[in-house]
Image (spheres, helix red, strand yellow):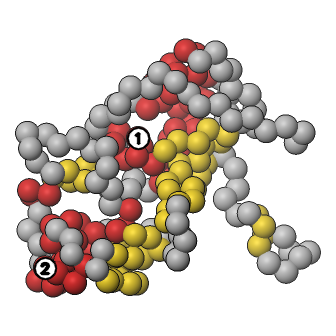
Amino acid sequence: MTSFEVIALQGLPLIEAGDDLIELIASALKLNGVTPRAGDVLVVAQKIVSKAEGRIVDLATIEPSAQAVALAADVDKDPRLVEVILSESIRVVRARRGVLIVEHRLGFIMANAGVDQSNVAPVDGSHRVLLLPENPDRSAETLRRGLAAATGTDVAVVINDSFGRPWRQGTAGVAIGVAGLPALILNSAVSGFWV
C-alpha cells in the first residue's frame, strides 16, 4: 500500500429502525461520487447499525430487579438503565459513583455495556437507549454482501464503536464487527499478535 485515503460520506439521513442501510450507503456513495474499489474498507458507525436493526429500548418498559436497584444506588444511575446494562452483560468489572464497567455478552470490556443514551431522540417523552447490534460480525457481513450486490464491488466492512480508555481521557475506535478482512492476524514466525 502506497497511500491511504479517508472519505466521509455526506448525505446520509438520520437513521431509523427498519431503514435499509445498504440502499442508503449505496446512494450516498453515488451522491459523493465515490466508486468503491476492491480492497476498500467501509467503516460504519455502530450507532447507525443498531438504529437500523431496531436495537432501541424504551426505559418506561423496563422493570428493574433488586440487583439493578442496589447497583444503581452505588453508581448513581437510573435503575432501569442499570437493568438494561446488566441484561447485556455477563459480569460487572468495576462499579463506583458515575462508573459502571462490565463485560458485555460479546466479550467486550466497556462502560455501560455499550448502552448509548446520546442521539436517541425521545418519542412522546419516553426515554430511549440504544444497544449494540445483536451480532456485529453478522451485521458487517450482511452489509458487505448487500453492498457488493448494489455496487458490483466486494468491499470489506468494519462496524466501529468508540470506547473510553481506563485512566485516560478521550476515546478510541474499536472494530466490534468485521467482514471481508481478517480482524486478527497471527504471525507464527514472531511471538505475539499483529493487528
Name the amino acid type tagged 2: Val
| Nearer-N-terminus badge (2/1) | 1
The answer to whether residue 136 is above or below residue 98 is: above
Query: What residue would you read off at disc 2?
Result: 69
Name the amino acid type tagged 1: Ile
Q: Residue furthest front?
A: 169
Residue at 57%, 56% in the rendered image: 173
Residue at 38%, 77% in the rendered image: 102
Can you say which quadrant of the picture contains the N terminus? top right
Residue at 74%, 34% in the rendered image: 5
Q: Position of residue 194 (x, y in %)?
A: 78, 67
Query: Quick check: can you spot residue 141?
Result: no
> Quick one: SS at disc 1?
helix
> Quick one: SS at disc 2?
helix
Q: Position of residue 170 (x, y in %)?
A: 52, 61
Q: Position of residue 187 (x, y in %)?
A: 84, 70
Query: What residue would you read off at disc 1?
Result: 48
Spatial CA distance of label 2 from label 1 is 30 Å
Residue at 32%, 83% in the rendered image: 96
Q: Contact, CB < 8 Å: mark 2 with mark 1?
A: no
Say few, some or many: other residues with alpha carbon within 10 Å of mark 2 (under 14 / 14 to 19 / 20 or more).
some
Q: Nearer the viewer, residue 84 or 19?
A: 84
